[in-house]
Image: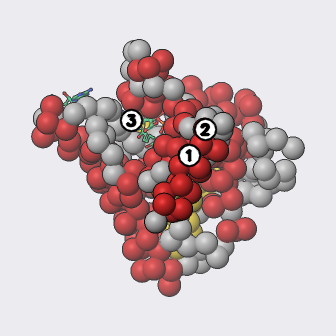
Amino acid sequence: MTFSEPMFKNKELQDKVIVVTGGGSGLGKSMSEYFLALGAKVIITSRNLEKLEKTSKELKETTGGEILPVACDVRNYEEVELMLAKTLDKFGKVDCLLNNAAGNFISPTERLSSNAFDTIIDIVLKGSKNCTLAFGKHWISSKKEKATILNIVTTYAWTGSGYVVPSAAAKAGVLAMTRSLAVEWAKYGIRLNAVAPGPFPTKGAWDRLLPGELKEKFDVTKKVPLRRVGEHQELANLAAYLLSDYSAYINGEVVTIDGGEWLQGAGEFNMLEQIPKEMWDMLEMMIRAKKEKK
Ligand code: HXC
Ligand code: NAP
C-alpha cells in the first residue's frame, strides 16, 4: 500500500450523518468525498450555494453517496440552527460535526483593521462555537447516545505565528474549546477531537498564504523533515478514523499531521541539519579538544 491510498476499505461510516462546514472546496471537499465513499450521508455547508451544488453533483457522481448542500454562514447562529434543522429534516438525525470552515490571509498585524481581525475570529472561533453549541444542545436535549465533533486547527494553535495572528488566536480558542468540552460533554456521549494539519495544498489556502511569487520564494517542503506536503487522502484517512467508532476511546486529543514541520521549527538545534556530513568529524574534534585542554 501507499500513504495516499484510502485506509478503510469497507463501509466503515455506513449510515453516519456528517456535517462538514466549508465542505464545498479544498480539504473539506476531499474529506467529504471519502466519508461518502465509506457510506456516510454528508451535508456540506458554506456561504456559496452555487459552489456547494457543483461540488455535490460532482461527489454524487464519483461516490454514488447521498449528499446535501446547504448554504450557511457559520458566523450567524440563526443560520447554523437552520442548517441543523435542514439536516434533521432530510436525514432524521446527525452523528458528526466537522468544523472545517475557515478564513485566513497573511498580513503584518498592525496593517489589519479591527474588522479584518474580527472577520477571521468570527469565521474560525465564533463559527466553530456556533456549530458546536447548536449541535451540542440538540444532541443533549434529544438524548443521543453518541456523537462526535472534529475540529480542524493547525500547529500554530499552540506555537502561535506572526503574520496570521487572528487565525492563530482563533485556532488556539478552538483547541481550548475542544479539550474543555471533551471533558464536560463526555457524560452526554459527545466526543471532541482536533486535527492539526501542516501544509496541504489547496487553492483557498495557497492563494491567501502564498500569493504571487511567495510560492517560489518559500519552498514549504523545506520546512518539513519529510520533505513533502500532505496529500488530501492522508488527512481524509485520519478524519474518517476520528469520526468512526474505531476511535471511541480517543477524546480531547489533537492529532498533528504535518510531517514533523512544527517540531523542526521548534527544536533549538534543528538548524544543524544544514551542516554537511563531512564537517561533523572536524566539529567533533574541536569539541573534544576543548575538554582535553582543561
Ligand atoms: C488586509 C484584508 C485582507 C488582506 C481582507 N481584508 N483581505 N485586510 N489584508 N489581504 C479585510 C477587508 O478590508 C475587511 O476589512 C475585512 O478584512 C473583511 O473582508 P471582506 O472581504 O469583507 O470579508 P469576507 O467577504 O467575509 O471574506 C473573508 C476573508 C476571505 C477571510 C477575507 O479571504 C474569505 O472569504 N476566506 C475564506 C476562505 C479562506 O480564507 N481559506 C483559507 C483558509 S487557510 P475592512 O476594515 O476594510 O472592512 C487556513 C490555513 C491555516 O486557515 C494553517 C496553514 C498552515
Ligand atoms: P478552503 O478551501 O478555503 O476552505 C475554507 C472553507 O471555509 C471554504 O469552503 C469556505 O467556503 C468556507 N468558509 C469560509 N468562511 C465561511 C463562513 N463564514 N461560513 C461558512 N463557511 C465558510 O481552505 P482549506 O485549505 O481547505 O482549509 C480547510 C481547513 O483546513 C481550515 O480550517 C484551515 O484552517 C485548515 N488548514 C488548512 C491547511 C492547508 O495547508 N490547506 C493547513 C492547516 C489547517 P465559502 O467561501 O463558500 O464560504
| Residue 141 showing in the rendered view | no
Mark 2 / mark 3, whichever is N-terminal: 3
**38 relative to 263 in the view: left or right:** right
Give neighbour class at mark 1: few <14, some 14-19, many 20+ (Cα, 10 Å). Answer: few
Q: Is residue 33 above or below residue 53?
A: below
The residue that disc 2 covers is 279
Give neighbour class at mark 2: few <14, some 14-19, many 20+ (Cα, 10 Å). Answer: few
From the viewer's side, name the closer residue of 70 and 289. Answer: 289
Kindly check if marks 1 and 2 are in contact, taking CB atoms under 8 A apart as contact. Answer: yes
**176 relative to 26 in the view: left or right:** left
- Beta carbon of the mark 3 residue lies under 8 A of ligand 2: yes
Q: Secondary structure at mark 2?
A: helix
Image location (x, y in percent) of residue 180? 39, 74
Image location (x, y in percent) of residue 157? 38, 55
Q: Which disc is residue 47 wearing?
A: 3
Specify the amino acid type for callout 1. Leu
Give neighbour class at mark 3: few <14, some 14-19, many 20+ (Cα, 10 Å). Answer: some
Mark 1 / mark 3, whichever is N-terminal: 3
Q: Residue furthest bottom?
A: 187
Q: Is residue 185 above or below residue 41?
A: below
Q: Residue at x 76, y 43 (%)?
A: 3
Quarter of the figure with residue 200: top right
The residue that disc 1 covers is 283
